[in-house]
Image: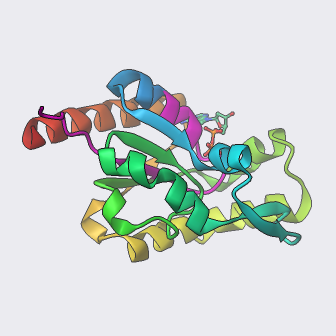
């Protein structure tokens, strides 16, 4: 029996940049499987404490990786998470870091209910391009790409680009 090979894609970036919106639509258009690591961790309670400063649970990274390993091995997974250095490098064929304008991001996070330090810290995370740098350190630079995610037009453009990349990857590997 031959299995169709499919790529694994990482969508990362500061909370609010549009990973979930892009990832779900991408899954619709490519047939790949969308996995939201935040949701997965919540469902399985894959936590190891609570971060008071950032007001969020701390992931038990080993359990998250264990939980995903078999699926990633098979391929065809779109992973969405606001961090990227917890995942094994070998999992991903391509990594996209979504980027959003500070003012834009501020508005999105505010309407999500973020306030005070949590709001400030997340906007700063974007200003300092923290996740981009994390991705450039964790993965080989030539597979890491930044995507603008400010407008619905950006979203459409990004979708079209990644769908095309996925189709080409499958041609090249099957
Ligand atoms: P994330 O999963 O990175 O936290 P999200 O997909 O939940 O982000 O999007 C946050 C909000 O921003 C949501 O209200 C949808 C909106 N949004 C996402 N991508 C966008 C884009 N390219 N242009 C305008 N708004 C966008």
Write the start and end of the magenta stretch as one range. 1-24
| Quarter, ligand 1 | top right
Q: Can residue 23 be spotted in the picture?
A: yes
Q: Quadrant of the C terminus?
A: top left
Q: Quadrant of the N terminus?
A: top left
Residue drawn at x 52%, y 68% is: 86
Residue 19 colored in magenta in the image = yes
Residue 60 colored in magenta in the image = no
Rendered view: 2 above or below 105: above
As rendered, which of 121 and 102 lies closer to the eye? 121
Residue drawn at x 63%, y 45% is: 40
Q: Position of residue 119 (x, y in %)?
A: 81, 58
Rendered view: 35 above or below 69: above
As rendered, which of 43 and 27 lies closer to the eye? 43
Q: Can residue 150 be spotted in the picture?
A: no
Which picture quadrant has residue 160?
A: top left
Rendered view: 33 above or below 125: above
Which picture quadrant has residue 55?
A: bottom right
Residue drawn at x 48%, y 47% is: 79
Q: Position of residue 98 (x, y in %)?
A: 49, 51
- Residue reaching furthest top? 28
Q: Is residue 85 left or right of residue 110?
A: left
Residue drawn at x 47%, y 64% is: 87
Q: Is residue 13 left or right of residue 89?
A: right
Tally the numbered discs.
Answer: 0
As rendered, which of 174 and 19 lies closer to the eye? 174
- Way the structure is coloured: rainbow
Rendered view: 91 above or below 24: below
- Residue reaching furthest front? 1
Q: Position of residue 110 (x, y in %)?
A: 82, 45
Q: Is residue 24 left or right of residue 101?
A: left
């Amino acid at each position: 029996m031959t299995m169709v090979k499919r790529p694994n894609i990482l969508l990362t970036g500061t909370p609010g940049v549009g990973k979930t919106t892009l990832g779900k639509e991408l899954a619709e258009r490519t047939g790949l499987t969308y996995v939201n690591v935040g949701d997965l961790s919540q469902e399985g309670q894959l936590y190891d404490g609570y971060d008071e400063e950032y007001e969020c649970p701390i992931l038990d990274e080993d359990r998250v990786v264990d939980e995903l390993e078999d699926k990633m091995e098979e391929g065809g997974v779109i992973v969405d998470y606001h961090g990227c250095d917890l995942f094994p490098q070998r999992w991903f064929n391509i990594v996209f870091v979504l980027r959003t304008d500070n003012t834009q991001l501020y508005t999105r996070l505010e309407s999500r209910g973020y306030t005070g330090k949590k709001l400030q810290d997340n906007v700063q995370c974007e200003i300092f391009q923290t996740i981009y740098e994390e991705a450039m350190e964790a993965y080989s630079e030539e597979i890491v790409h930044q995507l603008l995610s400010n407008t619905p037009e950006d979203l459409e453009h990004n979708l079209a680009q990644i769908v095309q990349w996925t189709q080409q990857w499958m041609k090249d590997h099957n």
